[in-house]
Amino acid sequence: MTETNKDVLLSMKGLRIEGRADEEWTEIVKGIDLTLHKGEVLGLIGESGAGKSTIGLAAMGFARDGCRITGGEITFDGIDLRAASERERRGLRGKRIAYVAQSAAASFNPAHKLIDQYAEAPVRHHVMSRSEAEHDAVDLYRRMQLPNPEEIGFRYPHQVSGGQLQRAMTAMAMSCRPDLIIFDEPTTALDVTTQIEVLAAIRDIVEQFDTAAIYITHDLAVVAQMADRIKVLLRGEEVEEADTRIMLDAPTQDYTKSLWAVRSFTRPTQPPVEKGVTPVVSVRNVTAAYGVIDVLTNISFDIHARRTVAVVGESGSGKSTTARVITGLLPPRRGEILFNGEALPPDYRRRTREQLRQAQMIYQMADTALNPKLRIRDLIGRPAQMYLGLQGKALEDRIKDLLSLIELEPGEYIDRVPSELSGGQKQRIGIARALAAEPQFIICDEVTSALDQLVAEGILKLLDRLQGEFDLAYMFITHDLATVRAIADEVVVMKEGLVIEAGPKLEVFQPPHDPYTELLLSSVPEMDPDWLTHLLEERDAGRAGADVEPAGH
Amino acid sequence: MGFLTGLFWLAAVIVGAMAAGWVFRTAVIAVSPHGVAREFRTMPLTAGFGLLMIVIYVLVAVFAPAIAPFSETAIVGREYQAWDNVHLLGTDNLGRDMLSRLIYGARNTVGIAFATTALAFILGSVLGLLAAVVGGWLDQLLSRMVDVLMAIPALIFALLLLTIVGTSVINMILVIAVIDATRVYRLARAVAMNIVVMDYVEAAKLRGEGLWRLITREILPNALAPLVAEFGLRFCFVFLTISALSFLGLGIQPPTADWGSMVRDNATLISFGDITPLLPAGAIALLTVSVNFVVDWQLHRASGLRE
């Protein structure tokens, strides 16, 4: 390694970082070694709590509030970042090392125009004058393929879309032409179609300026497109590190293999429903509006017992609104919801207790879906007590049964509050609460999108098993087509409040596609490192949904 | 020299207070069960001192007849007697024992302030939560009424109402409670508005839960922390309002002892360089500061602002 030492931009040796929780310091990064050469892109992957972001920030010599760097060396281009004064480090940040955060919407100051925020770093670091910085901004906006590069800088952050904002943030990180950029999950909050644009723009610009980058993500397919090398982390320790292609083809560690395997979870598709069977839920010609703006236009589809209907589409396509109409939170303007052939009252307040019991909902964010002040006993006991009239011993037994069903040890969990559970466990409690009502139909609203892949897989398997045991009908709202492939029987593709395509999964996923479905499908990242390159070539050639505008543009 | 001595005494008082707080905290941790002790361990010394003072005030108020050397209203000597062995803090403008009146004053002033604050809270938070959950015209109606009440300066409004309905303890409690309930209403509504949009409230609504259960089980437990903190602050304001009203002659009526009117009755002595009339004011100040110490600690915990 001595010959290549000149090229080494960043090196970490035995990095240890502690975090403070409940008045105690616990180690969250346990001796990580990392070497990054000039112009190289290193992918850091791992589940939440693996220490990815903490390491990313440590590359700037920075530790979050409540964290402290306790050991190891961090050397950036010959400068010892731990020994450097705060003033020296501040001189590097923004100028030579830049950071792109997960949520651009939360990272931009909403009170200032994009270009003012762009110019701040170069002017402050005396790299450019204000007018040079503005010219430069327009140039970079153009390279990032933002629409109207001359004007977009004069908008406020809320006036541009999420994908555009993320690209503007990448451009901003580039403003001082740094040697190193840290990307912390820059596309996680974006739709697949938007993600493509951002990924392509990031990759181009990193190549153009020969910038080194640390790319932090939990999405393997994304990192496969972006990184030259991949480092896999687990609970603050390195699992393995290798070149991207080697890592994808032949991971050596069991943990890495298990991460790779998640993507292969599927279940047998149920046979098509026979004609004449009454669907459990039938959405008939529903048009719904918030205020005067129609967000759903003439939606119709059926959900049968023991079937999973996946509703897919980008954000703003009306997926969640459809769920609100079915549950009665948003009475439709026109159309109706049939339950086992009978029309439900449009407003949930008019529905009988029995009608409410039959349709349950599992939410995306288990954190906000469970009352933090109630014990698990009350959270999942309440529906059983309310709908089924269980009391005392019978109720206690039922709660324990439910906990066993969701694979949590009853004795250990029954008296906990939600904050004493992990993300996946909370989501399981959400499932148990829905099951406690003994419904026929469950709406799953993005139930796995806030979870790590391994945990998400566990939830999907659980939902699948429960469906078999209790003959449940699922409406599965998601933007993740990998999930759809795994568990759906039928697919409803939505865009801007319209159903674009609907039918059995195999039909929808087999060519020929509707152009929009094609765009969605082709935008799902694949594990093949050449996937993005090929896709962009195809789209340039006018295929793979190239002529369809993604929703919201 | 005088300045240095003053500084020394100030430092001594602060050190003494913190030491008292530390002793009190250690004692509380030692006697309380494990779960509760954990909470107290995070308590800063200021809060420990505040809590100790509140406990002392409550004890004095409850056991006033046992502690006080003389009766509340009996004339036991000449007017404005100096401090001596019999009348430890001298006598007031009518020859009543100052220390006894100070002790009974704790009972009246603190007791009435507590009753008023509790009433204001029940009224304000129930209406505030209701407005947030039901929304629509009920919210509009209540909020606009509160706006109207809040548009009039509180003390002036209280004086006006008390002049209309007449001065009695019950009237005073009701008037101050209504005026302060408007502030509580605003807070309760604002806090509940943030909770109502949570998924777990939506889930409870879809489950078919009634309004009462929605408020008591889903919303109130999650709104409790800011409301408790507000209770402490509100208690101080109410306390000061009562003392101010008493000072102005519209509050607690003689011969009942209360700290506000005790200051007014003996104010003449101040011009003679006697600090006795300031003792009730000091008692008010000490309780106010103590309550705020405890409230600060609670606010800190509730908002998750550590360090």
Image (cartoon, coloured by chain):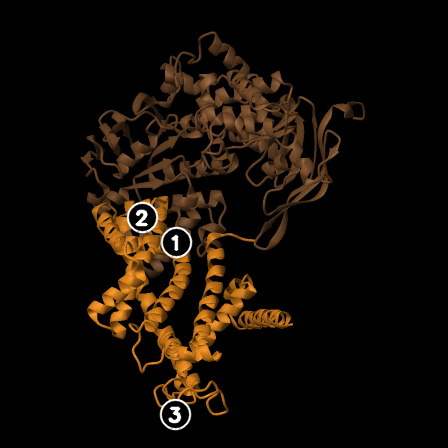
Per the model, the C-alpha gap separating discs 3 and 2 is 65 Å
Task: Label 3, secondary structure: give it.
Answer: loop
| Residue A185 seen by the camera | yes
> Residue B165: where, in percent of width, then height?
20, 69
N-terminal of the pair, mark 3 or mark 1, is: 3
Give the amino acid at mark 3. Val
Which chain's colour is brown?
A
Give the residue drawn at x 49%, y 69%.
B51
The answer to whether B187 appears left or right of A367 in the picture is left
Q: Is residue B30 above or below residue B269?
A: above
Per the model, the C-alpha gap separating discs 2 and 1 is 14 Å
Splitting the image into 4 quarters, where does residue A239 fall?
Answer: top right
Q: Is residue A3 above or below residue B239?
A: above
N-terminal of the pair, mark 3 or mark 2, is: 3
> Residue A27: where, in percent of width, then height?
64, 47
**A497 or A267, which is in the foreground?**
A497
**A301 or B234, which is in the foreground?**
B234
Label disc, if present, on residue B222 of the rendered structure:
1
